[in-house]
């Protein structure tokens, strides 16, 4: 007797989707800081996540910063108030912005307003996140070398009616003039869609004096 098989779908709630996206950002931030050598290689420890070897910082101040950031992002995501998160890498000496890792977030307004859930396979979401993480890990092949000590900051773009938490400050957008851009893969929980783009300063085309 013939039979059909279908891929199982998992129920995704607003709370669950917010947890997936905020956790993704924490791992992505760690991967960016490692692969762009913002912190020394020996300050990271290897773990397995998304079916991939990932690196997590062991620097206590960075761990605390990213942990607090993840909690705040999750809260904004559940409220449907977060539009994008940008990780900015800057020159430690001059403060010049060298790279902007831009994560644009689209939220299903109906889910936020009515509390309905959605369906998508956890494995499918993981495959989409894997693709992004692999691109971050290979960033050395398409981004200029950062040949000076760097620092990072994180910008959050929220709806205008969101009060700024006391641990955050209003900021300029830390833009790069005439940047080069590389669009990375996206992932979608069916509640939150995350598009990823990295823009960077490129001196190759500067005119010689």
Image (cartoon, rainbow, N blue to C red):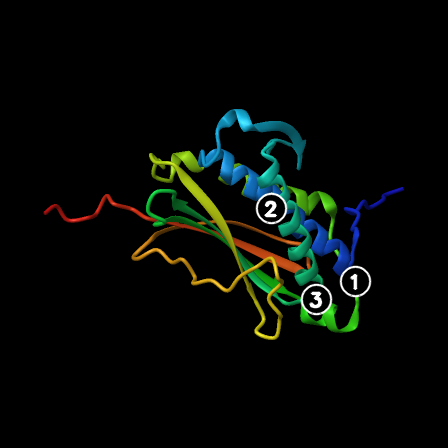
Is residue 160 left or right of 179 when viewed as pictured? right
Lower sequence index among marks 2 and 3: 2
Is residue 100 left or right of 128 when viewed as pictured? left
Residue 109 in view here: yes
Q: Residue 77, located in which quarter of the rendered image?
A: bottom right
Q: Which residue is mark 3?
A: 79
Q: Nearer the viewer, mark 2 or mark 3?
A: 2
Mark pair 1, 3: CA separation? 15 Å
Residue plotted at (57% across, 29% down): 44
Expressed as whole percent of the image width and height from the top left, the position of residue 34 reads 51, 34
- Judging from the image, what secondary structure is the residue with disc 1 in? loop
Residue plotted at (61% across, 36% down): 60
Mark pair 1, 2: CA separation? 31 Å
Point out the residue furthest to the right here.
Answer: 1
Q: Are marks 1 and 3 in contact (CB under 8 Å)?
A: no
Q: Which residue is mark 1?
A: 117
């Amino acid at each position: 007797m013939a039979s059909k098989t279908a891929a199982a779908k998992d129920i995704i709630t607003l709370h669950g989707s917010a947890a997936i996206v905020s956790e993704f950002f924490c791992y992505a931030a760690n991967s960016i800081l490692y692969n762009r050598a913002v912190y020394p290689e020996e300050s990271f420890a290897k773990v397995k996540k998304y079916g991939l070897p990932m690196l997590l910082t062991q620097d206590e101040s960075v761990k605390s910063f990213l942990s607090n950031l993840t909690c705040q992002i999750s809260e904004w995501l559940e409220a449907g108030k977060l539009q994008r998160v940008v990780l900015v890498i800057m020159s430690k000496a001059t403060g010049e912005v060298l790279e902007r890792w831009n994560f644009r977030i689209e939220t299903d307004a109906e889910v936020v307003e009515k509390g309905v859930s959605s369906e998508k396979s956890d494995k499918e979401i993981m495959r989409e996140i894997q693709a992004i993480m692999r691109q971050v890990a290979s960033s050395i092949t398409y981004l200029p070398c950062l040949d000076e000590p760097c620092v990072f900051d994180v910008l959050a773009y929220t709806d205008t009616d969101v009060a700024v938490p006391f641990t955050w400050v209003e900021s300029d957008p830390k833009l790069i003039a005439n940047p080069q851009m590389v669009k990375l893969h996206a992932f979608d929980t069916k509640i939150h869609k995350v598009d990823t783009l990295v823009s960077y300063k490129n001196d190759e085309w500067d005119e010689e004096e």
